[in-house]
Amino acid sequence: MASLIELLPKDYGFVAIVLVLYCFLNFYMGFQVGKARKKYNVPYPALYAIESENKQAKLFNCVQRGHQNSLETMPIFFMLMILGGLKHPLTSTALGLLHTVARYFYFTGYATGEPKNRLKLGGFHMLALLGLMVCTLSFGCTLIKQPANP
C-alpha cells in the first residue's frame, strides 16, 4: 500500500511551503499590531481603539484591521490552496505566492492610516483567490467525473 506522500503530486511540497510562508506573514502582522498597541496606547483586551478616548485610534485601528482582515480570509486561502493544489500544485503555488505578497501590501497599505492604500497592490489578493477557486473547482470536477469504484 502506498503512503499518502507517494499519492500526492510531486510538486505538492511547494504548496506546503507557501502555506508556511503565509504563517510567517501572519506572525509579522501580529507583531506589528503588538507594536501599535504600545505606540498608540491601546491595552488588551480591547480589539479596537475608541476614537472618543484616543486621538490616534484611527491609526491603531487601521493596523489592527489589516491584520484582522487577513485572519478572516486565511481559512479560505488555506482550504483553496490545499484542495486546488492536489490537481494544480504549481499554479496553486504561484497564486499562493501572489496572494501572500499582495496580503503584505494590503497590510502595510492599511497600516498607513489611510484605508484606501490597502488596495494599491493589496487588491491583487482577490485575483489570487479567484484563481485558486478555479483550481479547486477543477479538482472537484475531476473527482466527480471519475468512474465509480466497484
Image (cartoon, grey):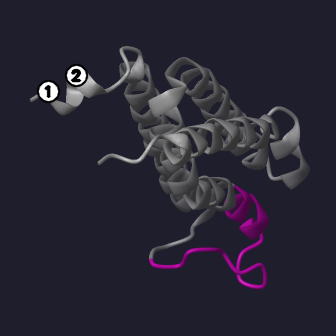
Spot occupied by residue 35 in the image (x, y as percentages of width and height):
51, 50
Spot occupied by residue 103 in the image (x, y as percentages of width and height):
66, 39
Instruction: Please give the name of the residue rendered at 20% of the width and 32% of the height, measured from the top-left corner.
Output: 4
Q: Amino acid at mark 1?
A: Ala
- Compared to 21, does 48 lie above or below? below
Q: Nearer the viewer, residue 91 or 1?
A: 1
Q: How many marks?
A: 2
Q: Nearer the viewer, residue 114 or 132?
A: 132
Residue topped by disc 1: 2
Instruction: Please give the name of the residue rendered at 68% of the width and 61% of the height, measured from the top-left corner.
Output: 65
Q: Is residue 39 visible?
A: no
Of all residues, the one furthest to the top in this rendering is: 10
Instruction: Please give the name of the residue rendered at 55% of the width and 25% of the height, measured from the top-left corner.
Output: 88
Q: Label 1 near label 2: C-beta < 8 Å?
A: yes
Label placed on residue 44 = none
Crowding near the residue tagged with mark 2, few <14, some 14–19, many ≥20 C-alpha atoms within 10 Å: few
Helix, strand or loop status at disc 2: helix
Q: Amino acid at mark 2?
A: Glu
Residue topped by disc 2: 6
The CA distance from mark 2 to mark 1 is 6 Å
Q: Nearer the viewer, residue 136 or 128?
A: 136
Spot occupied by residue 46 in the image (x, y as percentages of width and height):
53, 79
Helix, strand or loop status at disc 1: loop
Query: Is 122 part of what is drawn in magenta?
Result: no
Query: Is 51 part of what is drawn in magenta?
Result: yes
Of all residues, the one furthest to the left in this rendering is: 1
Q: Nearer the viewer, residue 101 or 111?
A: 101
Magenta extent: 45-62
